[in-house]
Image (cartoon, grey):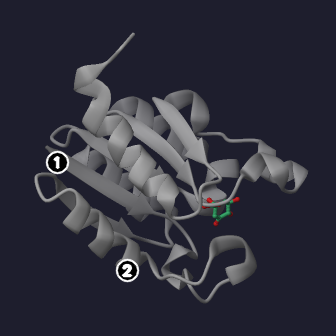
Amino acid sequence: MKIQIINGPNLNLLGVREPEIYGFSSFETCLEKLKSSYPEIEIAYYQSNIEGEIINKIHETGFSFDGIILNAGAYTHTSLAIHDAIKSVNTPVIEVHISNVYSREEIRRQSLIAGACKGMIAGFGLDSYRLAVEAINCSSLQIS
Ligand code: DQA
């Protein structure tokens, strides 16, 4: 199984950026933990602050990977182009957020990408990424 994690703008500063919201851990630490918890899964990681580069990565991996975990950062709330990119590929995309966007400012309660995604996980800190890996990993054991 191959999973691509894509992090959008400002998520390269995890651990430093607003730690009271996003925590004190870097994403690299989280990635190491994920890789050691799921040695049987190939987990690729990509981060970009640039909308078009995120779209290119969705195109590049969206026909060959088993799942994409996407935290589009603030582009979540603005990017119809990322919505369209998700719609353009076959690989299911799971929208992930570290914070509970629905408990924050009004503008964060709107996701332009949610309707194109298979599902959404938000509010569990960096554990949101592990829950998304579980969702992809378990989809072959579906109860419903
Ligand atoms: C975020 C929530 C977004 O509203 C914000 O712009 C981010 C991070 C999250 O993971 O909680 O950059 O996607």
Give the quarter of the figure containing the C terminus.
top left
Residue to which mark 1 is pinned: 2
Please report whichever mark, 1 or 2, sits nearer to the chain's N-terminal start: 1
Callout 2: SS: helix
Q: Is the CB of mark 2 within 8 Å of ligand 1?
A: no
Where is residue 103? Give x, y as percent.
83, 51
Residue 57, horizontal then vertical, whole percent: 31, 56
**Mark in front: 1 vs 2:** 2
109 with respect to 113 (left or right) = right
Q: Quick check: 138 left or right of 7? A: left
Q: Are marks 1 and 2 in contact (CB under 8 Å)?
A: no
Label 1 to label 2, Cα distance in Å?
20 Å
Q: Is residue 83 left or right of residue 55?
A: right
Which residue does the image show at 40% across and 39% down from the upper left?
93
* Crowdedness near tag 2: few (<14), some (14–19) or many (≥20) residues, C-alpha within 10 Å: few
Residue at point 55%, 43% (across, down): 121
Of the 4 image quadrants, the one containing the N terminus is top left
The residue at the far top in this view is: 144
Callout count:
2
Measured along the vertical axis of the image, is residue 46 above or below residue 56?
Answer: below
Instruction: Please name the residue that numbered disc 2 is placed on.
Output: 29
Residue at the image point whose x is 62% and y is 77% from the top = 23
Q: Where does residue 137 sit, x and y in percent of width and height?
A: 26, 38
Q: Nearer the viewer, residue 50 or 140?
A: 140
Q: Quadrant of ligand 1?
A: bottom right
Query: What residue is rendered at 78% in x and 46% in y?
Result: 102
